[in-house]
Image (spheres, grey):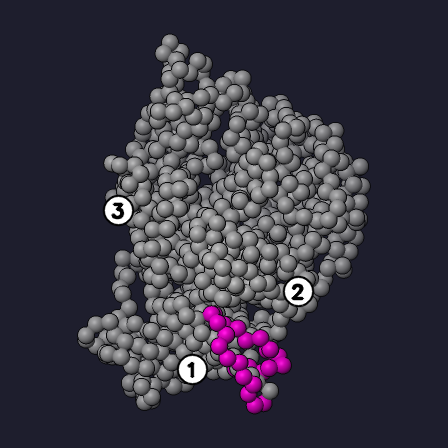
């Protein structure tokens, strides 16, 4: 493992690489325990004077180096654990390097590794240096020619980026294939796969009439599970043509599923490698959420071909340039797919559901990050380990920052900006500034006198701004005035900088007014009547006036979540109840329900923390009743309206955090809502069956989610007929969504023997399918009464394997992240378990260990007794000898 000497890399230290590497010719002689790689680089210096050629290399053995065919002696280069340096080179030359690595023993899943019976690579961000010595940085772009030799019987398919140019049989049962990628690319986009696979493929025609081959490779025996992946890939291809005019630039596009993978998937040029969880699906084994996840990740990786690959990042500080933009693109793709073939109102609620889902993810993962020790701007200033910066801030907040640009420019302006971005920068490695410069040129052209100079603060400052709203109504003048004031306290490293002053953000703030009787009000704004207006807040505080307003209105704020901020406005519960039933913006209507129920849950949690006896505000029951019975709402949207805010969202609003009080408050309110609306829940259960052939479309998935929500409410009060219904649904389900919906309601709320029988039966039936076994572990990790001891018991199950990230995530991460009560046990057993697992994982896979380490990020915001236990566990991890720099960065920042 790497040592933990913390070296910090700073954005402003960027220096151009002094050499061009025009072409990289790689030769792989694949063997499980010792693979030999010969790399031949055509190098030329950029300047007219000599420079040191610095190549990165980690965990690989150097066999030989030569320049223009002449071997170098040991005194002609220097080699340490991280670099190979050939000093003082100039002009044009060919550098050849022979090295060896051990794929079988590579448990980090970075570089070249073995998973199952196949070889795979993962190079982003710094994995290529674990394959061969190379300037492993995204601004060194080259064409690649790759030859792979391997045993033919075991590895009949030999894949790499680009086009297959030749394949030949070799002696001793081996064969070889040569691939050429015509596009210049950085090393992080290199990929190699060798193995035996099922293949599903299809020919498609691009908008310019070129025929391309789309292929999905998966484990032998899983080919029946790749239909949805291939369909999603084709949809992604068509969508990028239609929405952005971007066409596939290769003759063939391959996706390969792998069981052992650190992340979701990887956009290697023409050869995407995917965590099998984002490829394999059939109605019996995958849920609606899995289908949605596959579509979105396949879209995401495919869209990277233009936003990431054709135009890449100059350095890793620019990561959000490709990730924020590509997440925005995948979110839009999913929204368009969900809304397709629906009438206007169903399409609007399908889009709102997607937005709600994305905002919920932002609030549960990114807001806490932005308030904790790892807070960083979407373009960070420094890092110790780049793998730790594949964060919710870079991805999800990065996408919000792009979305705000889309909001400010409009669809047409944004498209014009994207066209200009490709025309200026295709084939280059660029910065976030380059992107915003392009967008600003369009913005200024369309809004003379305005620019995006303040908008750039979203790239340089961290933290979640708070926008305080004041409403003043003057009856005599029939005028309503809205004042927006922004503030954002320093966070993370900003707090450590002397004299740091935060500058205001450019915040697009979308809003409307609702009358006391629930009607949308028409507003005169920018010379035309509108029910939703876009205010651009650029100062600390600004006021807007609206005239001809005949009564004091209720403001509907931050519609569609037009900026990643927290809104402060003192609605009373009655005003919220009106918005909950009438807001014409479906996103804002859901927000009103969230606000009303969060207020109530936090009030009850505070009361419970002091040992008080709560009562439920009848307004909440009334809102639930209205939304359960409103015939104009579709099922999927209704399910979101009827779901209580999560523990994590509530914790963000509680100081100090009392996780158990939050959990108890949710139980209390859930039970009241279940009992109070018993008949309606039962009717809902009966009215939302989805008979016939399974389809993951938004309407059918929405019905299933509402039905399974009703089941969960009913089981939370141990309703006997619902328990029967859950068993029946579990036994008779024709798809995994319903089967798992029933089983999870039972596992969460029912203690009888049948529960254990159902669990045992589930395992028995699905033990051959690793993705379903992951679900089985996850269910138990999340269950009430599961504690660290239970998890240790499950880790002893023969199907558990700490080296497989999906398995570790399904059990250990699920428990530590989602099982509040189990983790925060007052005896400290949850924290001790966390520390043990971080240490154990660190010896196997530092990237995965560092992700688990982040569970304790916000320890200092918890109630005193818990806080002490968490700090102690963090200290134990920090003191562990030989800790990776990945985990060290996380725990040392947390303790700082
Ligand atoms: N670029 C990928 C994310 C990714 C990053 C690092 C990885 O290495 C373990 C793998 C994937 C994406 O955004 O999809
Ligand atoms: Zn990405």
- Pair 1/3: label in front: 1
Disc 2 target residue: 223
Magenta range is 149-172
Q: Position of residue 857 (x, y in %)?
A: 46, 50
Observer-nearest of 420 and 76 = 420
- Horizontally, is 750 left or right of 814 in the view? right
Identify the mark nearer the N-term, 2 or 1: 1
Residue drawn at x 54%, y 47% is 334
Residue drawn at x 24%, y 71% is 46
**CA separation in Å, label 2 and label 1:** 34 Å
Q: Are marks 2 and 1 in contact (CB under 8 Å)?
A: no
- Dot label at residue 274: none
Observer-nearest of 513 and 98 = 513
Disc 3 target residue: 498
- Horizontally, is 837 left or right of 457 in the view? right
Disc 1 target residue: 38
Queried on whether the Cβ of the residue with tag 2 lies below 8 angstroms from ligand 1, the answer reads no
Is disc 3 placed on a helix, strand or loop? loop
Identify the mark nearer the N-term, 3 or 2: 2
Is disc 1 placed on a helix, strand or loop? strand
Residue drawn at x 41%, y 48% is 398
Label 1: few (<14), some (14–19) or many (≥20) C-alpha neighbours in 10 Å: many
Q: Quadrant of residue 182?
A: bottom left
**CA separation in Å, label 3 and label 2:** 58 Å
Q: Are marks 3 and 2 in contact (CB under 8 Å)?
A: no
Residue drawn at x 37%, y 51% is 419
């Amino acid at each position: 493992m790497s040592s933990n000497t913390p070296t910090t890399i700073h954005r402003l230290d960027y220096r151009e690489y002094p050499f061009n590497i025009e072409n990289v010719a790689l030769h792989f002689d694949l063997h499980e325990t010792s693979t030999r790689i010969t790399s031949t680089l055509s190098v030329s210096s950029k300047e007219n004077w000599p420079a040191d050629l610095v190549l990165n290399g980690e965990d690989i053995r150097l066999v030989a180096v030569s320049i223009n065919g002449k071997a170098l002696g040991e005194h002609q280069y220097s080699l340490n654990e991280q670099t190979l340096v050939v000093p003082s080179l100039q002009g044009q030359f060919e550098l050849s390097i022979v090295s060896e690595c051990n794929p079988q023993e590579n448990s980090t899943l970075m570089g070249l590794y073995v998973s199952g019976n196949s070889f795979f690579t993962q190079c982003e961000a710094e994995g290529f240096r674990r394959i061969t010595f190379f300037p492993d940085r995204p601004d060194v772009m080259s064409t690649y020619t790759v030859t792979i030799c391997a045993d033919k019987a075991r590895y009949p398919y030999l894949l790499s980026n680009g086009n297959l140019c030749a394949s030949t049989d070799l002696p001793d049962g081996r064969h070889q294939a040569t691939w050429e990628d015509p596009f210049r690319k950085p090393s992080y986009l290199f990929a190699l796969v060798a193995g035996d696979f099922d293949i599903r493929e299809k020919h498609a025609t691009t908008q310019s009439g070129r025929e391309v081959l789309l292929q999905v490779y998966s484990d032998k025996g899983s080919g029946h599970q790749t239909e949805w992946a291939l369909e999603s890939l084709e949809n992604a291809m068509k969508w990028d043509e239609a929405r952005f005019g971007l066409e596939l630039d290769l003759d063939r596009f391959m996706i390969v599923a792998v069981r052992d993978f650190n992340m979701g998937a990887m956009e290697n040029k023409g050869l995407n490698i995917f965590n099998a969880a984002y490829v394999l699906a059939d109605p019996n084994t995958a849920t609606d959420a899995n289908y949605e996840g596959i579509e979105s990740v396949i879209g995401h990786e495919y869209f990277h071909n233009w936003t990431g690959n054709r135009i890449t990042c100059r350095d890793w500080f620019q990561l959000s340039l490709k990730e924020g933009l590509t997440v925005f693109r995948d979110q839009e793709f999913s929204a368009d797919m969900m809304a397709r073939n629906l009438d206007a109102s169903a399409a609007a609620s399908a889009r709102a559901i997607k937005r709600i889902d994305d905002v919920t993810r932002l609030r549960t993962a990114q807001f806490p990050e932005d308030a904790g020790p790892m807070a960083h701007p979407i373009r960070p200033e420094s890092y110790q380990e780049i793998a730790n910066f594949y964060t919710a801030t870079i991805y999800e907040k990065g996408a919000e920052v792009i979305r705000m640009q889309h909001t400010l420019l409009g669809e047409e302006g944004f498209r014009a900006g994207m066209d200009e971005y490709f025309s200026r920068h295709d084939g280059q490695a660029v910065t976030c500034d380059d992107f915003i410069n392009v967008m600003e040129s369009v913005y200024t052209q369309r809004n003379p006198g305005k620019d995006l100079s303040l908008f750039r603060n979203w790239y340089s400052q961290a933290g979640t701004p708070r926008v305080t709203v004041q409403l003043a109504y003057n009856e005599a003048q029939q005028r309503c005035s809205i004042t927006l004031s922004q503030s954002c306290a320093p966070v993370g490293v900003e707090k450590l900088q002397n004299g740091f002053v935060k500058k205001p953000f450019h915040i697009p703030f979308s809003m409307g007014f609702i009358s006391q009787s629930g009607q949308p009000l028409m507003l005169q704004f920018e010379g035309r009547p509108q029910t939703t207006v876009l205010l651009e807040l650029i100062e600390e505080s600004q006021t807007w006036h609206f005239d001809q307003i005949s009564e004091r209105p209720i403001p509907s704020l931050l519609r569609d979540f037009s900026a990643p901020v927290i809104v402060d406005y003192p609605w009373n519960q009655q005003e919220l109840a009106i918005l909950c039933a009438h807001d014409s913006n479906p996103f804002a209507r859901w927000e009103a329900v969230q606000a009303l129920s969060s207020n109530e849950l936090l009030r009850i949690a505070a009361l419970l923390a002091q040992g008080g006896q709560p009562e439920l505000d009848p307004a909440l029951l009334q809102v639930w009743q209205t939304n359960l019975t409103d015939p104009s709402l579709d099922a999927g949207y209704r399910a979101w309206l009827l779901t209580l805010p999560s523990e994590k969202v509530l914790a963000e609003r509680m100081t100090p955090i009392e996780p158990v009080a939050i959990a108890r408050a949710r139980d209390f309110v859930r039970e009241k809502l279940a009992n109070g609306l018993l008949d309606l829940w039962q009717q809902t259960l009966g009215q939302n069956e989805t008979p016939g052939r399974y389809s993951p479309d938004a309407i059918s998935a929405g019905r299933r989610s509402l039905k399974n929500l009703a089941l969960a409410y009913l089981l939370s009060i141990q309703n006997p007929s619902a328990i029967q219904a859950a068993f029946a649904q579990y036994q008779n389900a024709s798809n995994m969504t319903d089967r798992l919906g029933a089983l999870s309601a039972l596992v969460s709320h029912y203690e009888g023997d049948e529960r254990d029988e159902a669990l045992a039966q589930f395992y028995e039936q699905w033990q051959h399918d690793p993705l379903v076994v992951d679900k089985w572990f996850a269910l138990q990790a999340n269950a009430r009464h599961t504690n660290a001891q239970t998890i240790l018991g499950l880790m002893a199950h023969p199907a558990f394997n700490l080296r497989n990230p999906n398995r570790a995530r399904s059990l250990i991460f699920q428990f530590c992240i989602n099982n509040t009560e189990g983790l925060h046990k007052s005896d400290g057993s949850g924290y001790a378990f966390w520390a043990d697992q971080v240490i154990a994982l660190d010896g196997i896979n530092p990237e995965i260990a560092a992700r688990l380490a982040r569970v304790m990020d916000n320890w200092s915001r918890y109630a005193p007794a818990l806080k002490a236990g968490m700090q102690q566990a963090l200290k134990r991890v920090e003191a562990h000898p030989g800790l990776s720099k990945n985990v060290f960065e996380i725990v040392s920042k947390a303790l700082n």
